[in-house]
Image (cartoon, rainbow, N blue to C red):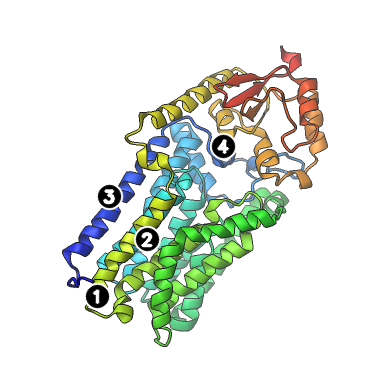
């Protein structure tokens, strides 16, 4: 293998190539953000954003809608929507900024743990490439996940640099804010706790006490605002599935390169008291724990692996600096080039065609524009509908100014509500035509039960034939209003 000098131009060029590929892969998510398209979770989150400053943020148990997320992102998106008028687009902007901020926080964590600038760049780029190339549906998606990761990651970045109790307190506040955005983003908080217990005990009490006080204070405030409904929603049962667990566990393959690089170097350093490598190792173990704890629940998607991807990227950055312990100083930069190449190859193997060719293939853009046009037409039709609505296409209803009264998405696609809600009452309301409109995905003629037994009969009793928009969605209007 050709030997290259430390900080060589070849290594810098390799990182520049990673950066260029990352920017190219971000073209499609950025372009997609401006269109009227239905994406998973966006309408659900937008409904809560519209309810952010009312008691409806956490519905009662007899509702056909639930909210099992903490409120912070809904407060932010709801406030932005009141300025800009659309919680979906506001949420997309917040999510994309949070994605960039998470990459920046990874850079700061690796630097704070003592690694070089190039190593920190490698870590941040690894995260961006895996997300933008292999998990791109969540880049710029109006969903609290990335905002939570950004807050928690910045908390960790502040903690690893902390020199005083005040620094630890500030880090704990950021971490608490992240968990008040989405409560399952636990890998970096757990890693921070273990790292403090072993390596920074003088900072443990300020960090832990601040987090405990912030958490208790937030709980009391939310309970006083929303009462038992807050607890009932947050503790809403999950449906577990072995197939969902297996599918989510397979997501580990997305992070195989940084995990392998970290694992090789960590094994060689196993007898060393390396605080930085220990922090990354704790985060990786906690990322696996997150998958094991939550990966079997229906409705849990690819975002369940983000904790592990972040931790593995941090580990890769630290291993980047320590690779010489495995291959020797003479070959270290050559192996860094191989690591960069391995990241690119792994992303190339799994990246969808549309993500790569989007900027050049007019057919991909035309398809997106067609979908957007169909939903715009549906939106305009829904604007003149009065009364409550029940939707699978939640965003379309939000864009038309309707708060969704029944979450047919979760009943159909996630099947997470049916076992715990009075679906007979929902079917009765549909059969009586009590919703001003019902919107289902796809061409729904003939109507099928769609995992809600009795739905077809209820729709036939209370609603006219569906109006289909671009083959994308079907609109049902009640017979009594026709």
Q: CA distance from mark 4 to mark 2?
A: 28 Å
Q: What residue is drawn where x is 40% and y is 57%?
A: 346
Earlier along the polypeptide chain: callout 4 or callout 1?
4
Q: Residues within 10 Å of mark 4 (few under 14, many from 20)?
A: many
Tags 4 and 2 in contact by the CB under 8 Å rule? no
Q: CA distance from mark 4 to mark 1?
A: 51 Å
Disc 4 element: helix
Indicate which disc residue 331 carries.
1
For label 3, the residue is 20
Q: Nearer the viewer, mark 1 or mark 2?
A: 1
Number of numbered labels in the structure image: 4
Tags 1 and 2 in contact by the CB under 8 Å rule? no
Q: Is residue 189 left or right of residue 23?
A: right
Q: Quadrant of residue 267?
A: bottom left
Tags 3 and 1 in contact by the CB under 8 Å rule? no
Earlier along the polypeptide chain: callout 4 or callout 3?
3
Q: Residue furthest front?
A: 1
Q: Nearer the viewer, mark 3 or mark 2?
A: 3
Check the image and report above or below for 427 versus 270. Answer: above
* Residue sitting nearer the eye, 187 or 226: 187
Check the image and report above or below for 60 versus 336. Answer: above
For label 4, the residue is 43
Indicate which disc residue 105 carries.
2
Check the image and report above or below for 189 versus 196. Answer: above
Earlier along the polypeptide chain: callout 3 or callout 2?
3
Earlier along the polypeptide chain: callout 1 or callout 2?
2
Q: What residue is drawn where x is 42% and y is 52%?
A: 349
Relative image position of residue 58 (x, y in whole percent): 66, 45
Earlier along the polypeptide chain: callout 3 or callout 1?
3
Tags 4 and 1 in contact by the CB under 8 Å rule? no
């Amino acid at each position: 293998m050709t030997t290259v000098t430390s900080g060589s131009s070849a290594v810098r060029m390799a990182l520049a190539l990673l950066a260029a590929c990352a920017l190219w892969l971000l073209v499609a998510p950025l372009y997609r953000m401006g269109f009227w398209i239905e994406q998973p979770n966006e309408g659900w989150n937008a409904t809560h954003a519209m309810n952010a400053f009312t008691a409806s943020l956490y519905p009662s148990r007899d509702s056909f809608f639930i909210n099992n997320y903490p409120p912070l992102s809904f407060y932010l998106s709801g406030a932005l929507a009141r300025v800009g008028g659309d919680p979906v687009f506001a949420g997309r902007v917040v999510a994309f900024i949070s994605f960039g901020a998470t990459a920046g926080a990874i850079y700061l964590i690796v630097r704070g743990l003592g690694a070089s600038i190039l190593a920190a760049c490698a870590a941040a780029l690894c995260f961006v490439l895996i997300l933008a190339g292999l998990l791109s549906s969540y880049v710029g998606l109006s969903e609290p996940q990335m905002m939570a990761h950004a807050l928690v990651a910045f908390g960790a970045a502040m903690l690893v640099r902390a020199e005083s109790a005040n620094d630890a307190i500030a880090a704990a506040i950021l971490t608490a804010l992240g968990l008040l955005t989405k409560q399952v983003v636990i890998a970096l908080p757990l890693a921070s706790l273990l790292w403090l217990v072993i390596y920074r005990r003088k900072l443990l009490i300020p960090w832990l006490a601040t987090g405990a006080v912030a958490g208790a204070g937030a709980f009391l405030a939310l309970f006083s605002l929303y009462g038992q409904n807050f607890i009932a929603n947050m503790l809403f049962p999950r449906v577990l599935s072995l197939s969902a667990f297996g599918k989510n566990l397979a997501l580990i393959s997305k992070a195989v390169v940084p995990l392998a690089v970290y694992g090789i170097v960590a094994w060689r350093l196993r007898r060393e008291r390396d605080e930085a490598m220990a922090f990354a190792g704790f985060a990786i173990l906690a990322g696996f724990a997150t998958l094991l704890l939550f990966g079997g629940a229906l409705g849990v998607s690819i975002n369940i692996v983000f904790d592990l991807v972040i931790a593995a990227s941090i580990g890769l950055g630290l291993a980047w600096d320590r690779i010489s312990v495995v291959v020797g100083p003479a070959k270290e930069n050559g192996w860094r080039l191989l690591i960069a190449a391995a990241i690119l190859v792994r992303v190339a193997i799994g990246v969808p065609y549309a993500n790569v060719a989007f900027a050049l293939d007019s057919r991909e853009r035309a398809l997106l524009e067609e979908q957007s046009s169909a939903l715009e037409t549906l939106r305009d039709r829904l604007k003149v509908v009065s009364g409550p609505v029940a939707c699978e296409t939640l965003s379309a209803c939000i864009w038309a100014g309707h708060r969704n009264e029944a979450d047919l998405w979760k009943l159909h696609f996630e099947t997470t509500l049916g076992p715990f809600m009075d679906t007979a009452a929902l079917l009765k309301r549909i059969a009586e035509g009590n919703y001003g409109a019902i919107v289902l995905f796809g061409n729904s003629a003939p109507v099928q039960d769609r995992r809600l037994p009795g739905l077809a009969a209820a729709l036939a009793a209370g609603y006219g034939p569906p109006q289909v928009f671009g083959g994308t969605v079907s609109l049902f209007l009640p017979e009594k209003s026709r």
